[in-house]
Amino acid sequence: MKKFKGRVIAGGHYKGEAIVSRQGVNTLATFQSSALKNSKQVLASDQNNPDIYEKNITGKALCLPITIGSTTGGMVIQTVCQMGIAPACFLFSEHIDSLAASGIVLAKVWEESDVICIDKLGEKFLETIKTGDIIEVREDGTITIL
């Protein structure tokens, strides 16, 4: 069992599967296709990210260094949260970027989303965690790989 502690942006408790991207996640490329199709789940559609491409990330813990892409990133996150098809958690190894932060905060305030977000988990976090690992996220920003 390994533990990591980060900074809580949006708290909550989660126990479930991790999906890991070792590179920045392009929010528009990842979520847009599922959102436009009004899908019941997000199958990551960014073919430039082989770590998550075509994986179901709805309701799972998306572990990533940072989000990348256009200025629509925050709006895309807010939209998939509003649709109920977002990841349960966004777990950042680095400092959260402003676009992801805006989308997550807007989803919490406007959509009453229960999305969890923790940043500053460190490089070691992404070196250790693997897709398919079962993790537990606590309100205080502690992540345990079970």
Image: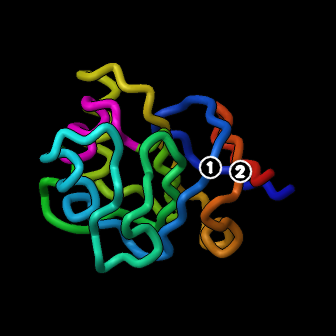
- Between 52 and 129, the one nearer to me in the picture: 52
Q: CA distance from mark 2 to mark 1?
A: 5 Å
Q: How is the image coloured?
A: rainbow
CB contact under 8 Å: marks 2 and 1: yes
Horizontally, is 72 left or right of 53 in the view? Answer: left
Query: Which image quarter holds the N terminus?
Result: bottom right
Decide: few, some or many residues near mark 2? Use Cα within 10 Å; few <14, some 14-19, many ≥20: some
Residue in the picture at 31% in, 35% down? 81
Report if residue 131 lies within the magenta region: no
Residue type (three-letter) at the residue carrying disc 2: Ile
Quickly name the residue at label 1.
17
- Give the extent of the magenta segment: 76-86
Q: Residue at x 20, y 67 (%)?
A: 69
- Which residue corresponds to the image point at 25% horizontal and 41% vertical from the top-left? 39
Write down the quadrant of residue 71 in the picture. bottom left
Could you say which disc has been placed on residue 1 in the image? none
Three-letter amino acid code of the residue under disc 1: Glu
Q: Is residue 139 above or below residue 39?
A: above
Helix, strand or loop at disc 1? strand
Residue 145 locus on image (x, y percent): 76, 54
For residue 127, above or below residue 38? below
The residue tagged 2 is: 134
Q: In the rendering, at what x and y percent does residue 25 appear?
A: 35, 66
x and y percent of residue 45 in the render? 28, 64
- Which SS type dominates the magenta stretch? helix
Confirm whether the magenta stretch covers residue 83. yes
Q: Residues within 10 Å of mark 1 (few under 14, many from 20)?
A: many
Residue 73 is left or right of residue 57, and the answer is: left
Judging from the image, what secondary structure is the residue with disc 2 in?
strand
